[in-house]
Amino acid sequence: MHQKDLQSQEIGPEGLTKWLLEKEWAPCRYGCPVHADVRTYIEHAACGDWEKAIDVIREQLPFAAVCGRICHHPCEDNCRRGDLEDPVAIREVKRFAAETQGAAGSSLHETKAHTGKKVAVVGAGPSGMSAALQLAKNGHMPVVFDRAEIAGGVPATIIPRYRLPLEVTRIDVDWICAHGVELRLGVEIGKDITIEQLLAAEEFDAVLIAVGLSSSRKLPLPGSDHPRVHTVMDFLRDTNRGDAPEIGKEVVVIGAGDVAMDAARTSLRLGAEKVKILCLENEEEIPAYEWEVREAREEGVEFIKRRGPVGIQLADTGDITGLTARKVTRVFDNEGMFAPAYDDSDVITVDADTVIFAIGQAPDPGYGRGSGLEIDERGRPNWSPDTYQTERENIFACGEIVTPPGSVVEACESGKRAAEAVHLYLSDETIELDRPLPYEIDALPEENADNILRRERMAVATLPPEERRCSFEVIDSTYPPDTAAFESRRCMSCGGGAEVLVDKCSTCLTCLRVCPFDAPLVTDVARIPAERCQACGICEAECPSNAIVMRRYNRGSLKNQTACILGAGEETLVAYIGGFHASAAEWRGEAIEKVPGVAELYLTSTASISVSDLLFAFEKGAGGLIVIPCKDNNDRYPLTAARTARRVEQAGAMLREAGVDASRLQMAPVADRGRDAVFRALDKFAGEISQMSVNS
Ligand SMILES: Cc1cc2nc3c(=O)[nH]c(=O)nc-3n(C[C@H](O)[C@H](O)[C@H](O)COP(=O)(O)OP(=O)(O)OC[C@H]3O[C@@H](n4cnc5c(N)ncnc54)[C@H](O)[C@@H]3O)c2cc1C
Ligand code: SF4
Ligand code: SF4
């Protein structure tokens, strides 16, 4: 338990403040390298609000569509739902939201007034484009140069189309460019123009190098200059451009990282009959992600482990006939450093007519030509991870040219931080980037997990391996809208739950009594540790001292929406509907038949509706109110229908006392039975109300 006691004067008059919501982060947000607010966008997606979902994603992640397809999703590794079954499929939900909305369907970020400063960004990959966006937001004029004819870096030019179609990368690039980012493609820095010329002749105020790792490493083995020996980056780049290099029927890929898996699977799609991965590592040491290895195996790729290449064998005709490989006795030394050792007495020949080196990427140091920068033997500039500056104060660097090879999302984070550094430099301020992060909420305690509804992760439709291996068709499908919403409803809203205003708490134990998850701890006052709370809002609705606030929503929001609807005057009947089983269309109010005169408001659950919420609708002039919960134990929270019934009964008694016909307040627990059942309940309710006299 991290949080310190909360006092009522610390929260604003509206209750919810951004500060309260940001007090502790859900583990998913911690796991994400850009710290995207996963919980919030998943909550919007759960309500079918894709517009809000993508806007929240893009607050931190410019490459939302690309990451929706190919991110290695460290957020999911941290997701607390994984302690119960499988983590929430965060990436798949992001994929749906980003692609449904497209570039035009995401709001643009505010850009500050022009500063008149120009920044040249070299490289239109994830790091360069993210930096350019951030620079534009800060009012500068970013111009992005890339030697490729398309923007997007490795995702656009190298990653195979069966994993990432080009139009998906275009969504992100177009959205970034809409902020005033200028692209100059087909311009190679160091060849067509130098960094020095950008600074002098073109009058840029700063340059940011984001050239990534465009080349491949290769071993100088006998035979390695044969035309059927390829390096992985060229092999994949040429294939993506529609100019696939010649390969034979038996391909050996040297290396077992993710890039090697792409090379092996691409070879199958280009017509190879047999594809083998030859690697130094044993099964446990294979560096590629488990799912990349599994998918490659499913498609028929074989693995030859613990072997190191010695030479490429050629026939008298000059054709490749095989690859000789020696036994590997160890890959890492006792300190865990890469230090392979071999047994030269144990050498095999692997049949092959084509060899692809996939043993790592390297920079192409040409960018530094004529810049006056010192470029080391690995092709990298001198660089400070604190300021992102090179040895020249107005030349910065970010992304994989300076960081270890990683992922798109990490490159985005690097670009954003570099842009902040450039901005501070251009503003004549000291470059200081690190700020403390909020606390991460702890693991789910076992004793609080019992009553949480279990729900299996929604599957993604995938092509069968025998179909996959023959074409560059995308191998898996985007979730349909309802699946995206239902999967999102598996999220437990970690860190978005209840907090006690300790100065208001009268230690009446109500929260402890009503909480279905035994979350509150009561000593001198009640306290609700974030890791125990499931954010259902029941205690907040029941607390007699109004001593509980919810981080993830404002108690007033249901009342505000109700007042808004009734104020508009078109509908006088209101329905509060538990939306746990409702389709995205129902939540969005689209493509469904409605009962005239009834305004439908969907909630995550009706469990959090208070008596005061129910009475408020009548105060605002509602002619009737119907609450439609899910049946008990078929809702996100336990006993919701019973709780809702009790509150409807209490509110009904108060209406009667006030001389209002209590049958104007009704309940029908059918929300989990589908739209027809809900429609019938609404229709019946509207019919009954219309029979009542106006004064009753
Ligand atoms: C085969 C492969 C598969 C991958 N799969 C995944 C994956 O599934 N998920 C994931 O998250 N990450 C993946 N990655 C990693 C990811 O692509 C990188 O982390 C990311 O692209 C790095 O971004 P960057 O901006 O630093 O560099 P890059 O994306 O490399 O962009 C650099 C840009 O600079 C340009 N450039 C270079 N030199 C010059 C010059 N002299 N003048 C002008 N322009 C120049 C290049 O043309 C390029 O467009 C993969 C990488 C590879 C190689
Ligand atoms: S359950 Fe939801 S809030 Fe909790 S870690 Fe997973 S995605 Fe994040
Ligand atoms: S919000 Fe729900 S889970 Fe959290 S303490 Fe209150 S009643 Fe318990």
Image (cartoon, helix red, strand yellow):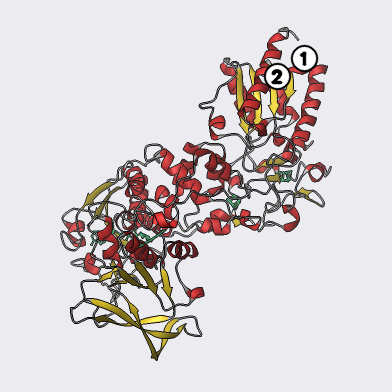
Asked which quadrant contains residue 364, the reply is bottom left
> Where residue 548 sits: x, y (%)?
72, 41
Mark 1 beta carbon near ligand 3 (under 8 Å): no
Q: Which residue is drawn at 40% across and 37% down?
A: 105
> Where residue 380 sits: x, y (%)?
30, 70
Q: Is residue 278 visible?
A: yes
Residue at disc 2, secondary structure: helix
Q: Which amino acid does label 2 sit on?
A: Phe
Disc ID at residue 660: 1
Residue at disc 1, secondary structure: loop
Is residue 249 placed above or below 207 in the rendered structure? Answer: below
Q: Which amino acid does label 1 sit on?
A: Val
Q: How crowded is mark 2: few (under 14 residues within 10 Å), some or many (20 or more)?
A: many
Q: Residue at x 82, y 52 (%)?
A: 523
Q: Quadrant of the N terminus?
A: bottom right
> Where residue 531 sits: x, y (%)?
68, 54
Q: Quadrant of the C terminus?
A: top right
**Pointers 1 and 2 in contact (C-beta within 8 Å):** yes
Identify the residue under disc 2.
618
Q: How far apart are marks 1 and 2 (CA)?
A: 9 Å
- Of the two numbered discs 1 and 2 on the same chain, state the one appearing first in sequence: 2
